[in-house]
Image (tube, helix red, strand yellow):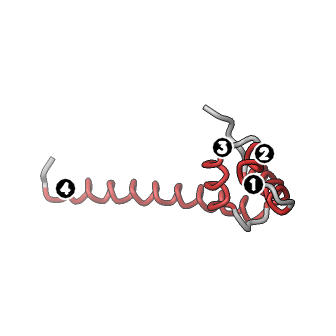
């Protein structure tokens, strides 16, 4: 498996790739320069393109919080279903 890049590092690499492209280089040249595959470059560009470092960090924090809240809701829903079964006497 490859190295996990943080949002700040990804945005820095995307900016470096934009410089290569602005100088007349190709996307494959830019990918080679930043050390990732073209597929990774396009995926990063889709997810982080146009974001600033602090915005990307905030987005990742919100995704973690959203995941935590979803897990809490599913736990509470399960508890509620168990209590409804117990209230009917179906142990």
Residue 65 rendering spot, x and y as whole percentages:
59, 59
Badge 4: few (under 14), some or many (20 or more) residues near its Cα, within 10 Å?
few
| Residue found at the far bottom of this picture | 50
**Residue to which mark 1 is pinned:** 26
Alpha carbon distance from label 1 to label 2: 13 Å
Earlier in the chain: of badge 1 and badge 2, it is 1
Please name the residue that numbered disc 2 is placed on.
34
Quick one: 30 or 71, which is closer to the camera? 30
Spot occupied by residue 49 in the image (x, y as percentages of width and height): 70, 64
x and y, in percent, of residue 58 in the image? 71, 63
Q: Is residue 63 left or right of residue 76?
A: right
Q: Earlier in the sequence, mark 3 or mark 1?
A: 1
Secondary structure state at the residue bearing disc 3? loop
* Residue drawn where x is 75% and y is 54% of the image: 26
Residue at the top extreme? Answer: 1
Q: Earlier in the sequence, mark 4 or mark 1?
A: 1
Q: CA distance from mark 4 to mark 1?
A: 62 Å
Q: Using a 10 Å C-alpha cutoff, classify the residue at mark 3 as few (fewer than 14 neighbours), some (14 to 19) or many (20 or more).
A: few
Foreground pick, 38 / 59:
38
SS for callout 2: helix
**Viewer-nearest of discs 2 and 4:** 2
The CA distance from mark 3 to mark 1 is 13 Å
């Amino acid at each position: 498996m490859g190295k996990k890049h943080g949002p700040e590092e990804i945005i820095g690499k995307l900016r470096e790739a934009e410089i290569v492209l602005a100088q007349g280089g190709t996307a494959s040249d830019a990918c080679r320069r930043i050390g990732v595959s073209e597929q990774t470059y396009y995926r990063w560009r889709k997810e982080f393109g146009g974001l600033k470092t602090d915005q990307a960090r905030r987005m990742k924090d919100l995704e973690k919080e959203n995941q935590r809240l979803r897990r809490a809701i599913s736990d509470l829903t399960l508890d509620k279903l168990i209590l409804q079964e117990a209230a009917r006497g179906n142990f």
